Image (spheres, rainbow, N blue to C red):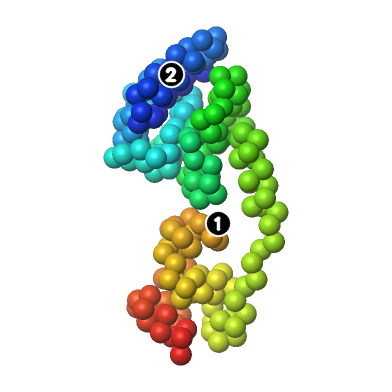
Amino acid sequence: MIRVLVVDDQAIVRDGLVTVLSLVPDLEVVGEAADGAEALAAVAEHAPDVVLMDLRMPVVDGPTATARITEQHPGVAVLVLTTFADDESITTALRAGARGYLTKDAGRVEIATAIRAVASGQSTFDAAIGARLVAQLTAPAPAAPTGLRDRFPELTPREADVLERIADGRTNPEIAAELFLTVPTVKSYVNQLFQKLGVRTRAEAVALVLR
């Protein structure tokens, strides 16, 4: 029997999922949560095998809850079930540790199959999400900013990528999404390039680039 925790901020969606999953013989819904904070507490209390996780919720959002669950309870698999299928939502969820990603137009059979897959250690995505991931992985990499590397040879190519985006006014989350990095990794690159360039703020870095 696979133990499932259902997490969604809409009560009617939670009720529907609980009802649907209760009809599947090898699945047992052991709890519900209305936001990420409740999900964290429920995982500790009920020890589910799989968390069926919405993304956009109050208090603690889905990606944050996913990251904490996968860090604190590595044996628990998170399967995202959301209305959002944009690239940023997908990559944010996967970086947080989600093992699968479905949209809410998935039917009972598809959801049950995905739950079984992630519970067994596999990754699973619906057809549309899979196509988007393939497109991302096969897209040609953007050319590195050769001009910045020539001007600042002390920077690595990735640091030059980050500097170029700082100069364009991108925030750390935006840079992370564009370069398929985590936000902490971007922060690390920013700190490294600031140290190499002898600047303390983004404004000083931009001014240096614009000279």
Residue 72 drawn at (x, y percent): 40, 37
Residue named by callout 1: 180
Q: Residue at x 37, y 41 (%)?
A: 61
- What is the crowding at mark 2: few (fewer than 14 residues within 10 Å), some, or many (at least 20)? few
Which quarter of the picture shows residue 62?
Answer: top left
Residue in front for this viewpoint, 92 or 70: 92
Three-letter residue code for mark 2? Gly
Left or right: 203, with 25 as reference point: left
Q: Is residue 162 visible?
A: yes
Residue named by callout 2: 16
Left or right: 20, with 10 as reference point: right
- What is the crowding at mark 1: few (fewer than 14 residues within 10 Å), some, or many (at least 20)? some
Left or right: 108, with 18 as reference point: right
Q: Is residue 78 visible?
A: no
Question: Is 89 situated above or below 192?
Answer: above
Q: Residue at x 56, y 81 (%)?
A: 148
Q: Residue at x 43, y 39 (%)?
A: 55
- Could you say whether the residue bearing mark 2 is in a helix, strand or loop? helix
Q: Residue at x 43, y 18 (%)?
A: 16
Question: Label 1 to label 2, Cα distance in Å?
Answer: 34 Å
Residue 98 drawn at (x, y percent): 51, 38
Which quarter of the picture shows residue 66?
Answer: top left
Residue in front for this viewpoint, 188 or 181: 181
- Could you say whether the residue bearing mark 1 is in a helix, strand or loop? loop
